[in-house]
Amino acid sequence: RLTLLLPGVLSGAGTYFLVRRMRHMAVLPSCMGAILACFYLALRAAGASVDDARAYGWIGEADRAGPLMDTWRYIDFGKVVWSALPGQVFTVLSMTLVVALSSCLDVAAIELELGKKLDYDHELRTVGVSNIISGVTGGYSGSYIFSQTIFTLRSGVRSRVAGYTVAALEGLIVALPFPIIAYIPRLFFGSLLVMICTDLMVEWLVEVRRKVTGPQYCVALATFGLIMGAGVEWGILAGLALHQAVM
């Protein structure tokens, strides 16, 4: 529904504009807080409750949070169907390749933002160790949140306190006895996605033209189209093949 879509799009576009024009560490957090404050002020002005907003679709359904330790009760090796493991070898290898490749792309993006060379081998080892720790504790595979790193750099933050703060807040959210996500409007997440998407597309489809040669820029645009049409994995592979053929 347009009424649910439009506020998130407008909020994301406005946040992007303010972050680009006012390069200060307080701009993005202030915009995020303002989005939440405006939503609940509008909700109160309309005389609606949180349950009304949830019924209309503004807020997601509230799932009851279980005990924290229940997370690890699902890790039961006795229920693993080991005979199915050989058939997953290609999937595991593909996932390893995708995470390694995406990690390299993340490092490259951060490298461009910093304007200096980074040690790719060191960064990949960091990602590998992090994934091992995440896997043995029941987590998912992953890589850098390079968009957060870049936004932090652009906000003028050069301290590790930002990372420690994010980790502490995420731990607090997990430990809370109620699902905090159930009280955050969907337009909040949508606005952040719009902001990040707009920033990445402007930077890597428009502004990057000044940083690369003509053929490289054509490969970048073609790779973007291939990813949109064929998916991330096949699009990246096709883009690499195209780069080798053209360059």
Image (cartoon, rainbow, N blue to C red):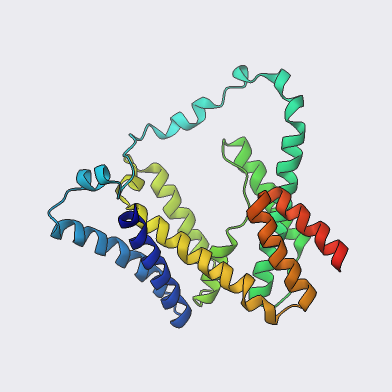
At 44% across and 31% down in the image, what residue appears?
A: 69
Q: Position of residue 193 (x, y in %)?
A: 47, 59
Q: Position of residue 92 (x, y in %)?
A: 72, 37
Left or right of 94 in this view: 161? left
The quarter of the picture where the C terminus appears is bottom right
Residue sitting nearer the eye, 219 or 70: 219
Q: Does residue 143 lie above or below 147 as drawn?
A: above
Residue sitting nearer the eye, 71 or 189: 189
Left or right of 187 in this view: 170? right
- Determine if residue 125 is in view: no
Q: Position of residue 7 (x, y in %)?
A: 33, 62
Q: Does residue 83 lie above or below 66 as drawn?
A: above
Residue sitting nearer the eye, 140 or 158: 140
At 66% across and 49% down in the image, what residue appears?
A: 231
Q: Does residue 39 lie above or below 56 as drawn?
A: below
The quadrant holding residue 43 is bottom left
- Determine if residue 61 is in view: yes
Task: Count the numbered circles shown.
Answer: 0
At 29% across and 48% down in the image, what residue appears?
A: 183
Q: Position of residue 4 (x, y in %)?
A: 33, 54
